[in-house]
Structures are given as C-alpha cells and as structure tokens.
Image (tube, rainbow, N blue to C red):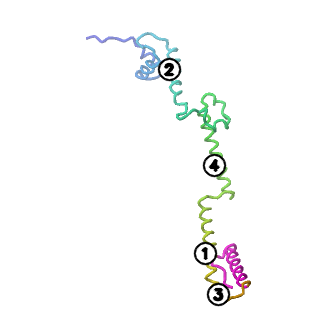
Amino acid sequence: MERKKRPGYLTQYANHAGITKPAAAEQLKRVGIDYMQPFDFAEADKRREAARHADRAAYSKPIYGDPHDDPESEEEDEPDPDAAKDPVFARSQARKELFRAKMAELDYQERLGKLIDKEKADEEYFRIGRLVRDALLNIPSRLAGILAAESDQRKVHDLLEKEIRQALEALVHGNTGGAAAA
C-alpha cells in the first residue's frame, strides 16, 4: 500500500512562522486559508496578525454597561497617549493610579496626626462618655446627706454647682477617680 503524499505547504508555512504544524493548521483554518493549495506566506502572516488582534477586541470592551454612562470617566482626562488604542484600559489604569494617590495621601495625613482611625475614635468617645456619666451619677451619692440637712436654697444650689464643676474639671485634667466631696 502506497502512502499518499501531500504537497507540504503546511510544513513549509509552520517552518516559516516558527510554530508547530497543528498550530499552523489551526491558525490558517481560522483565517480561511486552505493549506492544501499553494498560498502566499506574506498574506497568511497578515491575516494571522489581524486575527490575533481581532481576538482581543472582544475582551477590551467593558463587561457591564456602556462605558459612556460612567460618570467618573467624564471627569478624568486620559493621561496616556496610547489611550486611543484602548480607552477602557486607560480609564481603569487612571482610576487605579488615582486610588493609589488618595491612599498615599490618607496614609500621609494619618502619619501627620491629622487623621485617626474611626474605630479608635469611636472607642475613645465611648470611654469619655462613660467617664462623664459616672462622674455625674456619683454626685447624688456624695451630696445626698449634706443636701438633706440643708434648708437654704442658695446653699444647695452652690453645693450642686461646685460638685458638678469639680466632677467635670476632674475629667478635663484626667483625674478619673472622681471629685472630692465638699
């Protein structure tokens, strides 16, 4: 049984393009070239290159929504001259760089002491609120006996005012042990 010889165009083109025969067959088939017939290698190279870039075009478009509806895209200028080639990629790169710049600015301001962590601030507000509450709620227990024996309204007022002032000043000066009884 004699083996049928093929013309060898596929082998020649695979050697020319520097790819394997199955890869060459797949790529030529995709661009519509019959490798069983003689064909121009330069034309095949052009078609392969065009098809390679055309394959990427589907991935360069946004997946969700229309890119012209994006409100942030109107605010930003395209910093890259290659942006005309792929404006969606350029916009995403610009957003990424803007985000990095904002994060660096926040980190800088935090290190300067102009910004604090929200959770730490909430914890500190809670601690201060608890100290104020405790200081004010301790006043009646300290003054109950004194005020019960006092009949002069002006003296009662002065004692309450003095005790509240002492409790608040103790908080300001960091003395959390409470104000001394009058």
| Dot in front, 1 or 3 | 3
In the image shown, does 111 or 12 lie closer to the viewer? 111
Q: Earlier in the sequence, mark 4 or mark 1?
A: 4
x 59%, y 60%: residue: 119
Q: Earlier in the sequence, mark 2 or mark 1?
A: 2
Spatial separation of the CA atoms under disc 4 and disc 1: 40 Å
x 44%, y 20%: residue: 24
Q: Secondary structure at mark 3?
A: helix
Task: Decide: few, some or many residues near mark 3? Use Cα within 10 Å; few <14, some 14-19, many ≥20.
Answer: few
The residue singled out by tag 2 in the image is 48
| Dot in front, 4 or 1 | 1
Q: Secondary structure at mark 4?
A: helix
- Where residue 38 appears, as percent x and y from the top left, is 44, 10
The residue singled out by tag 1 in the image is 134
In the image, the segment drawn in magenta is 155-182
| Dot in front, 3 or 4 | 3
- Where residue 34 appears, as percent x and y from the top left, is 43, 13
Residue 148: image tag: 3
| Dot in front, 3 or 2 | 3
Q: Is residue 165 magenta?
A: yes
Spatial separation of the CA atoms under disc 2 and disc 4: 44 Å
Tell me which amino acid carries mark 3.
Ala
Q: Earlier in the sequence, mark 3 or mark 4?
A: 4
Q: Is residue 176 magenta?
A: yes
Q: Secondary structure at mark 2?
A: helix
The residue singled out by tag 4 in the image is 103
Q: Earlier in the sequence, mark 3 or mark 2?
A: 2
Tell me which amino acid carries mark 2.
Arg
Task: Decide: few, some or many residues near mark 1? Use Cα within 10 Å; few <14, some 14-19, many ≥20.
Answer: some
In the image shown, does 83 or 22 lie closer to the viewer? 83
- Where residue 151 appears, as percent x and y from the top left, is 69, 88
Q: Cβ–Cβ below 8 Å for labels 3 and 4?
A: no
